[in-house]
Amino acid sequence: MPGTSDVADESATSAYGDRTADGAKGPSRVPALLARVPRLGVWAWSFVGFVVASIIVFVALAAVSEIVLPLTFAAVLAIIFKPVVRILERHKVWPALAAGIVVLGLLAVVAGVIIATVRGVTQQADQISGVADKAVGKAADLTDAVGVDQSSLDALRKAIDDAAPMITTGVLSGLVSGFGTVVAVVSGVILGALIMYYLLKDGTRLRRAVVGLVDPEFRSDLDDFIGDSCRVLRDYGRGRTVMSAIVAVAIGLVALLLGLPLVFTIIVVNFIGGYIPTSAPS
């Protein structure tokens, strides 16, 4: 009978609904759970893809580490010294020639500093040894006061006497023993110089090309971001240079008044050390 069938369907539906409302395992829960499986699968494979991509990036960076470091230094130096190229260009110097002058000038300064430092150390090796020997002699007079063992002072004096010839011959032997390292450093310097030259010469054109690849709606923002980043880096370089120069000159004057050897080397080391970031002690 039609009426009986309708009543049976309604009672079955109400009973089914009661079972699902009470928390029993009903068939309607299964499709809802299955609908989440594709989404979970996408998340899982996305995570796996992210991990694999990260590994590939790290391995690639490790493989090209000899290129990344010179590239980084060249980019930073190119940004800092770009105003010098612009000054030369305003004086009717070709961009290629201006970039070459800046790169060669920077290489000449670095080479001059290294040669002067090594030469100063080797030429004043005897003076350094004499000063150190006098200091050990004064310490020997105060053996009882400072509580230093005499055997330790004798060992220190012997080490100082042996260090004098090592200063003059150690540079050459170090170069010979570390020939592979020297070749790697020289290769990095040459590569960095070439990258810096092309960035100084064509940096503006490269910036315009990069900005042109972005959607026109965001080109102005990207160009402003690059310009602000370059200005901040140049300001940091100028500030660090001024502070390093002041500290190096002050320490050099004190060393000169005290009659210390290698005053020029002390000034250079302190000036270069001003560019090395240090963390404050906790």
Image (cartoon, helix red, strand yellow):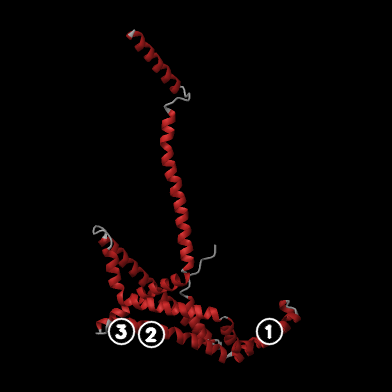
Report the Cα–Cα distance between label 2 and label 3. Answer: 12 Å
The three-letter code of the residue at mark 2 reads: Gly
Q: Disc 1, disc 3: CB below 8 Å?
A: no
Q: Secondary structure at mark 1?
A: helix
**Residue 164, percent from left and from top:** 63, 88
Residue 268 versus residue 17: which sits nearer the camera? 17
Report the Cα–Cα distance between label 2 and label 1. Answer: 40 Å
Q: Secondary structure at mark 3?
A: helix
> Can the viewer see residue 99?
yes
Where on the picture, by quarter, is residue 234?
Answer: bottom left
Q: Which residue is mark 3?
A: 97
> Looking at the picture, does residue 45 appear above or below residue 187?
above
Residue at horizontal 30 percent and vertical 84 percent from the top: 97
Please state which of the two labelled residues, at mark 2 or mark 1, is closer to the viewer: 2
Please state which of the two labelled residues, at mark 2 or mark 3, is closer to the viewer: 3
Q: Disc 2, disc 1: CB below 8 Å?
A: no
**Residue 49, percent from left and from top:** 44, 52
Q: Mark 2 or mark 1, which has the lower sequence index? A: 2
> Can the viewer see residue 223?
no
The three-letter code of the residue at mark 1 reads: Ala
**Residue 77, percent from left and from top:** 39, 75
The three-letter code of the residue at mark 3 reads: Leu
**Residue 84, percent from left and from top:** 32, 80
Q: For this view, does 87 lie left or right of residue 173?
A: left
Q: Residues within 10 Å of mark 1 (few under 14, many from 20)?
A: few
Q: Residues within 10 Å of mark 3 (few under 14, many from 20)?
A: some
Q: Mark 1 or mark 3, which has the lower sequence index? A: 3
Where on the picture, by quarter, is residue 110?
Answer: bottom left
Q: Which residue is mark 1?
A: 159
Residue at horizontal 28 percent and vertical 79 percent from the top: 86
Please state which of the two labelled residues, at mark 1 or mark 3, is closer to the viewer: 3
